[in-house]
Amino acid sequence: MDFQLNVQPSSSPVKSTESVKVLVLGSGPAGLAAALYAARADLNPLVLSGIDLGGQAALTSTIENYPGFPEGVGGVELGDLFQKQAERFGARIELDSASTVDLSQRPFRVSTYSKDYLVNALIIATGASPNHLNVPGEKEMTGHGVSYCATCDGWFFKGKQVVVVGGGDSALEEGLFLTRFASSVTIVHRRDSFRAGAILQRRVKEDPKINYIFDSVVTKIAGEKVVEGIHLQNVKSLAETYLPTDGIFIFIGHTPNTTLFKGQLDMDENGYLRADGKMQTSVSGVYAAGEVADPVFRQVITSAGMGAAAAIQVTNFLGHN
């Protein structure tokens, strides 16, 4: 007798659901500091780290202004220390990202692609992502001479000429880092002076490998298979020039990672979450820490402090709720 196997189309697997007291979104200084404080309060926090474990700080070669490290500390190393300390007290870190968030009622529902979490208190520390120039050639040449991380890609430019775009602390720090590899570094800034701190400005101006061009913006990135040069325009005279280069590193600020929370939490005109002095957002039980809610200071130490403050407030909130 012949048997016919009737196979029904498989449905999507049912996601499991887990209840957690405190969920932290993000694993930068703010998220890991929050996890540390929440763990020490015996709240068993869960951290969804996202794909950037350590946050933007992990992309910085050397952090010289974090207390306790007089000789400076590598961004990755500092992130590892944060993580180990939080895990020592019971924080759990998952290499996963939230795909949807429902803050309409408590417990809040936070979903990843594989699991749902019912959350009593939420700390948002999703940070901010690098801004793009949005000029012709940028997208096409990303990974082929266009970069947003000197620590990641500087080694590939040994003995070559590179351009750094930006005038803040990050731009100058990464420009100085690139001198370890590149034969020359040209910093292009749209204003007539840098915005970075005085010490960084002095180092840049004293470094023989670094040149700078003020009052100018990049209008196009040129090249066939790799970056070959950039087109510049002077913002005052409108004169256009072409600068040959092997690579361009872009550090022109960041955009907060708040897309998941649009329509659910109050934000400012630039998308940063609004939080009060106690890190409380517009929804009770939801707190924000770090660059996702800080368009002003954006430092490792201030982000860590905000994370600690958020966790302290979560402890108080759960004690009363």
Image (cartoon, grey):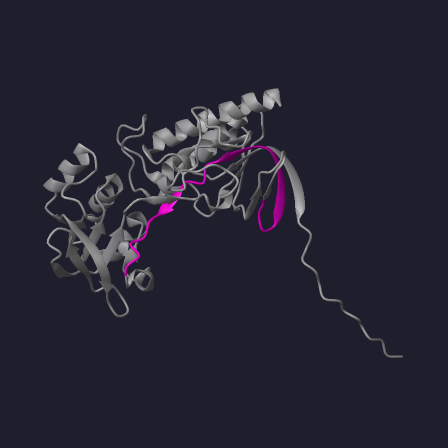
Q: Quadrant of the N terminus?
A: bottom right
Q: Please report the residue visible at 13 percent of the width from the left and 60 percent of the height from the top.
A: 240
Q: Is residue 293 above or below residue 137?
A: above
Question: Where is residue 250 drawn, in percent x and y?
Answer: 27, 51
Q: Residue 101's image quarter?
A: top right
The stretch in magenta equals 111-135
- In the picture, measured across the screen, residue 104 lies left or right of residue 165, that is right
Q: Is residue 85 above or below residue 11?
A: above
- In the picture, measured across the screen, residue 43 lies left or right of residue 81, that is right
Q: Is residue 37 above or below residue 159?
A: above
In the foreground, 255 or 4: 255
Q: Please report the residue visible at 52 percent of the width from the left and 45 percent of the height from the top.
A: 95
- In the picture, measured across the screen, residue 206 lies left or right of residue 113, that is left
- The answer to if 123 sits in the magenta stretch is yes
Tell which residue pokes out farthest to the right in this image. 1
- The answer to if 128 sits in the magenta stretch is yes
In the foreground, 40 or 112: 112
Q: Please report the residue visible at 31 percent of the width from the left and 29 percent of the height from the top.
A: 66
Q: How many labels does the image show?
A: 0
Q: Please report the residue visible at 32 percent of the width from the left and 60 percent of the height from the top.
A: 142
Q: Residue 117's image quarter?
A: top right
Question: Where is residue 48 drawn, in percent x and y?
Answer: 52, 41
